Image (spheres, helix red, strand yellow):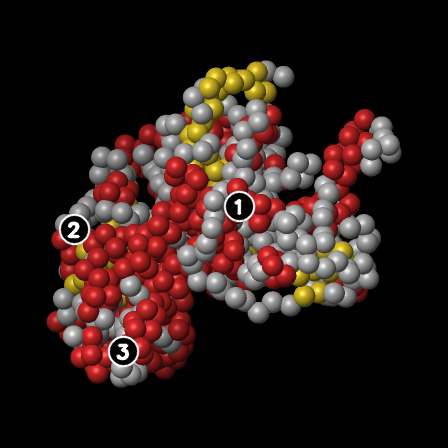
Amino acid sequence: MPVVTLTINDELVSGQAGQTLLSLLQERGIEMPTLCHLEGLSERGGCRLCMVEMKGSPRLFAACVTPVQEDMVVYTHTERLINYRRMILELLFSERNHYCAVCVMNGHCELQTQAAENGMTSVRYDYLNPDLPMDASHERYVLDHNRCILCTRCIRVCDEIEGAHVWDLMGRGVNSMLISDLAMPWGDSVTCTNCGKCVQVCPTGALFTRGSTVAEMEKHHNFLKWILTGREQNQWDYSNL
Amino acid sequence: MNRVELQNMAQTETERQSAFRCRLLCCASTPCLSSGSTAVSEAMKEALVAGNLNGEVEVVATGCMGPCSRGPLVTVKVPGQEDVIYEQVTPEIAKEIVTQHVAENKPVSEHMLPADMPFFVKQKKIVLSNSGQIDPEKLEDYVARQGYTALAHALREMTPEEVCATITQSGLRGRGGAGFPTGIKWDLVRKSQGDKKYVVANGDEGDPGAYMDRTLMESDPHRLLEGMAIAGYAVGADQGYLYVRGEYPIAAQRLQRAIRAAERRGILGSRVLDSNFTFRVDVRIGAGAFVCGEETALMASIMGRRGQPVPRPPYPAERGLWGKPTLINNVETFGNIAPIILNGAEWFAGIGTEKSKGSKIFALAGNIDTTGLIEVPMGITLREIVYDIANGIPDGYAFKAVQTGGPSGGCIPAQYLDTPVDYQSLGALGSIMGSGGLVVMDERSCMADVAKYFIEFCMDESCGKCVPCRVGTVQMHRILERVTNGSADFDDLKMLEELCTLVRETSLCGLGQNAPNPVISTLRYFRDEYEAHITERRCPAGACEMDSIPVRELRTNSLVYSHDGAQAEAAKA
């Protein structure tokens, strides 16, 4: 693999050609806020939290979909970027009904963590308070649209890892909705394999195990790495699972 | 079919047409059809039969003639005489035209448009040169006007490199909005490695009030196919897709017929014009999403996926449709190709300004005397367009602003009316050339209300993939709603400006990045209007209802005295 040299936050670093800027930043231990990104899934570039500044370009770049290039000069935590990240988080909180205090994921939620880490203390925008349903028709899991941030991790894991493609999006803009099969109740889905991968990758309390109550739900996505290395190297290590 | 057969076809058709004593061209594009041109052409045909002129006179259903608000339009063509155009033709007038003008050569003066009308004189028709002159459903008619000779010439006399070089030298830039140099894009695709390449024509025109692409597709479909075929030859593609907006059924139908006609004659398909070049074209019809005009979303839609943009790079020139190198241009760009090949790059480069060459089609709409479709040389001033071509603003109202570029563009105020229309000048004013929508507004339009309209459009059309565009546009719309109903305060204005910057800088695709432009440009030129809404709770243009008050005042007022606004004011004083 050819090596490329670039400057990140005034420090010379080298990375491998072809890798994304985000993976290099994470290798270097630079904390980047992400929501739609999840290692092992395809990149989406939708949450816009990992935007970075690039010297010589007025545009901002989403690190998760930007390949590293020779002589790039990147800044990851300028005042402008921190401000934008806060605003994007505020927008996400205003979009649907994110009431942490009564959420199954309280304390383990990625959205909540991002808000805390990025210093988002209040939401200045109007809460849109949409009237959204819940889908508790599945025997093991529940979908709560009120907590969904449309990161589509569930869609991607179901399509790319499980191969079932139960989930997809319906509608557009702020009216986009996660649907199972052709907009039927999850419990009636004929394609769903009940594997629960979507639940484990969901960053918020939108997908959770039936029966869990406030702050009880915890999610683990180390299974993704396990499956991917297993498939690539045909080694299935059951000891640490 | 080969070159000689093409020439023969042209000659036969020219002879057939010149055998008529008179030809009656009746516009059959969407605006005229909706104002009743079908009845007009029927009436003319009946009158011809009644007057026993059937064999000597031909009635032709053509494409757009330009001044759409004056439709239905009819052109009377008598060999050796200047064309006469009639406006607002009813079936009764159509009969008069036949009985007086055609039969006795006495033009009906009442509905005649003057030949020296600035609307026609100031135009420079390159792309639309056939529009309104030929029957779009007749291949022969197009061939008779040098149709497909540029393709024949390119296939026989030029290498793909030469075609790309000619387009580069001509200085043609993409007509879809961004203005990327067309020749350079072609060359990129030509150099891309790939066993299969594609050419895509973007006919998903979605800007409110814009219909340049529709008119081109409806009026001269073969011109578009010829441009695509030349592009296919230049970049090494053998398959083209025409992405037509779902709201344009007539355009899609005419294009499909044109493709079939061309394939039947060996002008498209395998062995184009008896050469080794193969090129097929298929029509894909959109399902009504504005975002599908964005190239990556459009390609997703062609492939049958959800119409959502994907981050670039990779650009379509490297990896486009099904991962193959893809050339994607606006239909108007393709409309420019055949004339450039026929007349040479120097000819084209001689038209327009230093950095913006050629002509541009604009759809004139709004508070002006004549709305319609025009093609003007680059560098013409906005004043000439508004006051000469469109004949100014009716009823004596004052000009306020012209909105260019649709929801991605901005509003240009009166002091910049003498700005030449080209990519750089409009960009410097905070607007864009865009695909060519031009909406003129007079003093009765409230600029905050206009901004709200465009933000509402972007909000409805946001695909929902990235957060700033999906939620940011909703929040901007909410604030503008407050401005226009009188309940905004200065914090709202500050928040609006912050949101504008956020959405512009962090959105994923062009739709989101340019969505705040109408707000930014109206705030730049008409800030006093926004402020009047807030401080004086008054809409200077008188367009907004202003029936609410800010939440904060609601609270203090109710504490002080009562819900009655006037008494509350007195109590505060």
Residue B113 appearing in the image: no
Q: Is residue A139 left or right of residue B4?
A: right
User: B152 or A212: nearer the eye?
Assistant: A212
Q: Residue at x 79, y 65 (%)?
A: A188
Q: Which residue is mark 1?
A: A116
Residue A44 drawn at (x, y percent)? 58, 42
Q: Which residue is mark 3?
A: B560
On screen, residue B229 above or below B251: above
Q: Quick one: quadrant of the C terminus of chain B? A: bottom left
How many numbered markers are drawn? 3
Classify residue B66 by image quadrant: bottom left
Residue type, numbered disc 1: Ala
Question: What is the secondary structure assignment of the residue under circle 1?
Answer: helix
- Residue B75 locus on image (x, y percent): 29, 66
| SS at circle 2 | helix
Q: Residues within 10 Å of mark 1 (few under 14, many from 20)?
A: few
- Residue contact at pointers 3 and 1, CB within 8 angstroms: no
Residue at image coords 36%, 47%:
B501
The Cα–Cα distance between marks 1 and 2, rounded to whole angstroms, is 48 Å
Dot 3 falls on a residue whose secondary structure is helix
Image coordinates for residue B408, horizontal then vertical, percent:
36, 52
Residue B416 is marked as 2
Q: Residues within 10 Å of mark 2 (few under 14, many from 20)?
A: some
Q: Nearer the viewer, residue A55 or B368?
A: A55
Instruction: Tell me which corner region of the image, top left, top right, bottom left or bottom right, holds residue B413.
Output: bottom left
Name the front one of labels 3 and 1.
3
* Label 2 in the same subunit as label 3: yes
Q: Chain of mark 3?
A: B
